[in-house]
Image (cartoon, rainbow, N blue to C red):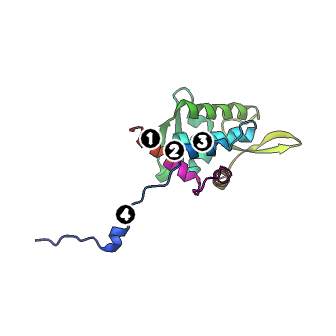
Amino acid sequence: MKPTAVKTTKQARRSKRLPETLTEEETRSLIAQVSTSSATGLRNRAMLAAMLGAGLRVSEVVDLYPADIDFGEGTLRVNNGKGGRDRVIPVDGETLAHLRAWSEKRKTFGVNGRQPFFCRIRTNAGATVLAAGEGITTRTVQALVTGLGQRAGLEKAVHPHILRHTYATRLLDRGY
């Protein structure tokens, strides 16, 4: 007869915790901190939409290219995501609307499709221009999300991955 495995107290204490997420009210408060009256605001709102509406990781947001967004099909393509995997994610109309608004504004700066979708923005003599189509960094997105959470007065530590957890929890709540 084989001996049965007995859980030690150390193993019993290592139970999996549920990830922290934002409530609907907290999410609305976070989003409300972004003014879409400027090009930077449109870009930042579209980045939040990609994380909250498609569950993208921060690295996937900064690696997104215009060709990865299929507005007709309502999908985002993640190339070489975690583990080197590619995937296609269906997104809702609200998320697509924010991505489309940034896409249209982005075109006015004269960048092409070979440059990252979320480009750096700077102001030159009062005119807003893209920084030669340079992509933003993961650190920039992390700082943005953390800053928005602080301005919203949220007591939770807000970071990009909490937006991914919020997306996944919403899907589970809807029965997906």
Three-letter amino acid code at disc 3? Arg
The residue mark sitting in front, 3 or 1, is 3
Which numbered disc, 4 or 2, marks the residue that appears first in the sequence?
A: 4
User: Which amino acid type is marked by label 2?
Assistant: Gly
Q: Which of marks 1 and 2 is nearer the N terminus?
A: 2
Gap between marks 3 and 1, in whole Å? Answer: 17 Å
Give the label, 1 or 2, closer to the camera: 1
Query: Does residue 117 show up?
Result: no
| 125 left or right of 104 in image | right
Q: Residue at x 33, y 70 (%)?
A: 11
Badge 4: residue crowd in 10 Å (few <14, some 14–19, many ≥20): few
Q: Where is residue 119 in the image (x, y as percent from the top left)?
A: 70, 43
Per the model, the C-alpha gap separating discs 1 and 2 is: 10 Å
Q: What element carries label 4?
A: loop
What residue is at 59 percent from the left and 40 percent from the top?
Answer: 49
Q: Residues within 10 Å of mark 2 (few under 14, many from 20)?
A: many
Q: In which quarter of the image is the C terminus?
A: top left
- The quadrant the N terminus occupies is bottom left
Q: Mark 4 points at which residue?
A: 15
Based on the picture, tell me whether residue 2 belongs to the magenta stretch: no
Which numbered tag is attached to residue 93? none
- Is tag 4's residue or tag 3's residue first in the polypeptide sequence? 4
> In the structure shown, which secondary structural element does the residue marked by tag 2 occupy?
loop
Viewer-nearest residue: 170 or 5: 170
Where are the magenta residues, as a range? Answer: 148-165
The amino acid marked with disc number 1 is: Leu
> Does 142 sit above or below residue 96?
below
Q: Is mark 1 on a helix, strand or loop?
A: helix
Do the residues under discs 4 and 1 have CB atoms within 8 angstroms? no
Q: Name the residue under label 2.
A: 55
Circle number at residue 28: 3
* Dot 1 alpha-carbon crowd within 10 angstroms: few under 14, some 14 to 19, many 20 or more: few
